Amino acid sequence: MLDISRKTETLRTATARATLRLKAETVARIRDGSVPKGDPLAVARVAAIQAAKNTPQLLPYCHPVPLDFVGVEFELGEDNVVITVTATAVANTGVEMEALTGASVAALTVYDMLKMLDDSLLIGEVVLVSKRGGKSDFRDQFDRPLRAAVVVMSDTIAAGKKDDRSGRIIVERLEAEGVEIADYRLLPDDAPLIQETLLRYCDELKLDLVLTTGGTGLGPRDNTPEALTGVIEREAPGIAEAMRAYGQRRTPRSMLSRGRAGVRGNTLLVALPGSRTGVAESLDALLPGLFHAFHMMWGEGHA
């Protein structure tokens, strides 16, 4: 199985369709309720729901997903039965296999209940009609690359006594998302210097995004949140809440982070933790959904 522990939970929906071809007289038997084994559609509906819920037991590489809904619909044609199955879950992986499995088993169930009446039965295509809720659904398009700065807050790193790794992680992740890195800087945990640097990024360079790492804990030299007080004009508390909530599911120490986020002018500032793991997990929680903030800041709404 693939490791999906870094993926963010979102509302996932998938719809699959299966087609069963049969004689017109067999369709008539379904319509008038004269199938000897009973109503195949009612049984197939239950079978589809059961199959969708048990998909990981049938397909070895599927992750168990807590399904919130499985809907099954039938359309009787002149010489076919079209089965549509929709699966929904709030999860960190998709539910397309659950929908496909449900549709397949529903078709097999109808086949089983009609085979004594019709030797022309044929299960046709089983196709995925749609899926929503994955990472690609939350990618925003821009007319130009976003410009960002990455700032590392650490006395030891700024003094050259320790190598920076967290800042490099941020740079690599942003570049992978198509963001242009306008500046990458190492600063000591000095609140006035941090504030001066951030103000320059916002007011002079007018960057789109500033991500900082370090100085968000409870140590005597953790000054980043205080430095941001004189910079941020509007708080964006949901961003910091998302980072802590994501991290808290992985380590009980996430609650100790004092990360903040907010806006100055048209610049979005986000203070990430200092540890490599904390940075990586925070970026997992925020990207790519964070970029939608710029459409909002630019007055473009949620389109």
Image (spheres, helix red, strand yellow):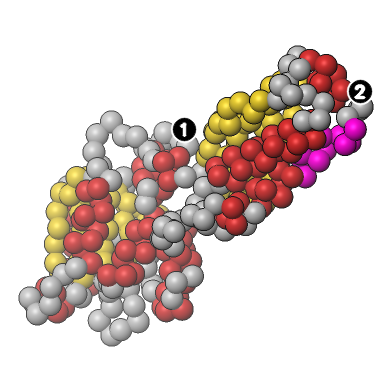
Q: Is residue 200 left or right of residue 298?
A: left
Q: Residues within 10 Å of mark 2 (few under 14, many from 20)?
A: few
Residue 200 coordinates in the image, percent (x, y): 18, 55
Identify which residue is drawn at 31% across, 56% down.
269
Q: CA distance from mark 2 to mark 1?
A: 48 Å
Residue 281 at what x, y percent from top left? 37, 64
Is disc 1 surrounded by few (<14), some (14 to 19) or many (20+) residues within 10 Å?
few
What is the magenta segment's predominant secondary structure? helix
Residue pointed to by mark 1: 303
- Which is more toward the observer, 100 or 185? 100
Task: Give the residues in magenta.
Answer: 36-46
Classify mark 1: helix, strand or loop.
loop
Kind of residue indicated by mark 2 = Asp
Query: In the image, what residue occupies the spot 88% across and 36% down?
Result: 37
**Residue 18 is covered by the magenta coloring:** no
The answer to which of 68 and 149 lies nearer the viewer is 68
Q: Is residue 232 above or below residue 297?
A: below
Report x, y in % for residue 74.
74, 29
Give amino acid for label 1: Ala
| Residue plotted at (42% across, 79% down) | 253
> Is 39 colored magenta in this rendering?
yes
Residue assigned mark 2: 32
Residue 27 relative to residue 158: left or right: right
Q: Position of residue 242 (x, y in %)?
A: 46, 61
Furthest toward the left, the residue is: 160
Q: Is residue 41 left or right of residue 254?
A: right
Residue 290's label in the rendered image is none
Which label lies toward us, 2 or 1?
A: 2
Farthest residue, direction bottom: 220
Closer to the camera, 8 or 271? Answer: 8
